[in-house]
Amino acid sequence: MPRTETATAAEIELWRLQARMARDVVNANTHGLTHEDSLVEPRPGGNRLNWVLGHLLSVYDGIGAWTRY
């Protein structure tokens, strides 16, 4: 459900902190990987790294839409 009211400064700062933490975790876990590595399908199941990163970008883009003021 989309959020329509304006985000508070505290909410915005919380999302910024979480985004920085997610960025740091992604950087630590993908350092040295190639594009080809990001296309490998995990076994026995799971999503490719490209899918996971695309999902994160989509989520944080959606958050950005309601935190702008």
Image (cartoon, rainbow, N blue to C red):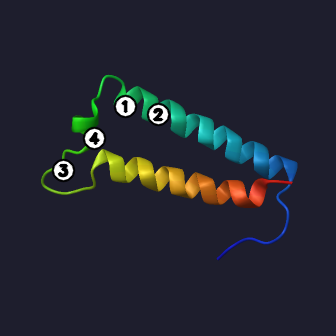
Residue at x 79% of width, y 72% of height? 4
Give x and y (percent) for residue 10.
83, 47
Q: Provide the residue designation for mark 4.
A: 38
Residue at x 82% of width, y 58% of height? 7
Sequence-first disc among 1 and 3: 1
Q: CA distance from mark 1 to mark 3?
A: 16 Å
Instruction: Give the number of marks.
Output: 4
Sequence-first disc among 2 and 4: 2
Q: Provide the residue designation for mark 2.
A: 25
Q: Provide the residue designation for mark 1.
A: 29
Nearer the observer, disc 4 or disc 1?
4
Q: Callout 2 environment at 10 Å: few (<14), some (14 to 19), or many (20+)?
A: few
Nearer the observer, disc 3 or disc 2?
3
Callout 1–callout 3 Cβ contact below 8 Å: no
Which quadrant of the rendered structure holds the N terminus? bottom right
Q: Secondary structure at mark 1?
A: helix
Nearer the observer, disc 2 or disc 4?
4
Amino acid type assigned to the residue bearing label 1 in the image: Asn
Q: Provide the residue designation for mark 3.
A: 41
Residue extending furthest front?
A: 35
Along the line of sight, the residue nearer the viewer: 18 or 53? 53
Amino acid type assigned to the residue bearing label 2 in the image: Val
Q: Is residue 24 above or below residue 12?
A: above
Amino acid type assigned to the residue bearing label 3 in the image: Glu
Residue at x 38% of width, y 51% of height? 52
Residue extending furthest top?
A: 32
Q: CA distance from mark 4 to mark 1?
A: 12 Å
Q: Is residue 7 above or below residue 39?
A: below
Which quadrant of the rendered structure holds the C terminus? bottom right
Amino acid type assigned to the residue bearing label 4 in the image: Ser
